[in-house]
Amino acid sequence: MISILGLMTCYNRKEKTLTALNNLIQGNPEVDFSFIVADDGSTDGTFEELQKISGVVIVRGDGSLFYSGGMRLAIAEAQKADKQFDYCLLFNDDVDFVKSAITDLCKKDNSVIWVGPTSDENGDLSYGGIVKTSKWRPKTEIVMADIAEGRVCDTFNANCVLIPWKIFEKLDNIDEVYTHSMGDFDYGFSAVKKGHQIRVSDQYVGV
């Protein structure tokens, strides 16, 4: 069985948070999931419900973490883990994951980082791999692949990113300069600078 440590941050989106976790667990029976969830001081019962789910470790914030701060806290906790996993999964709790999405990603080349693209409710690409479109300006484009071998990217949106554990162990954390947005961009750029390839899949993992 494949072992994956999932990392997520959340705040007052109880239904979305629980749906994301349950879809991952129930939709990928071949995967043994553990999770580290950074709950940024939720007041809607999210924390209490998370405590009921087996395999979930919760680290708490005070409401000031936002996205990058929450993910940084979760990654820091994962970096202290004694257990070895096959993969680390970075994901957002607002993704409605489709069945077998993560299992299918695990069947791909396990020497690279895989980005699972997501669609909006109209079926159009919403998040995925990121490629630079200019050598001189900070211009980028969100992309997905059109072949099973994937498309090489410069970085990613971390709505769904599967990182082989042997790569995750070598990566630094999200830089503390980022509070909310752009932390995942920088994390991906840093991975590429360390010599790790990023590819985006040709199949949506969720909405």
Image (cartoon, rainbow, N blue to C red):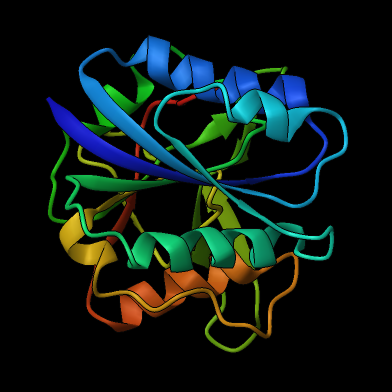
For residue 197, say whether it is visible: no
* Most distant residue in the right direction: 43
Instruction: Using the image as rendered, state which of residue 145 and residue 37 is in the foreground.
Output: 37
Q: Is residue 40 above or below residue 44?
A: below
User: Which residue is at the front of the view, 74 or 170?
Assistant: 74
Furthest-bottom residue in view?
136
Residue at x-position 20% and y-position 35%: 3
On screen, residue 106 versus residue 206, left or right, reads left
Say which residue appears at 35% left-offset and 67% top-offset.
79
Viewport quadrant of the N terminus: top left
Image quarter hosting the C terminus: top right
The residue closer to the viewer here, 162 or 138, is: 162
Residue 22 placement (x, y as % from top left)? 51, 16
| Occupied quadrant, residue 159 | top right
- Nearest the eye: 28 or 181: 28
The reply, left or right, for residue 66 in relation to residue 142 is right
Q: Is residue 203 left or right of residue 178?
A: left
State the image coordinates of residue 185 (x, y, percent, origin top left). 56, 68
Whether residue 31 can be seen here: yes
How far across and how far down the image is residue 74, in percent? 52, 58
The answer to which image quadrant residue 8 occupies is top right
Q: Position of residue 143 (x, y in %)?
A: 51, 47
Image quadrant of residue 175?
A: bottom right
What is the count of numbered marks? 0
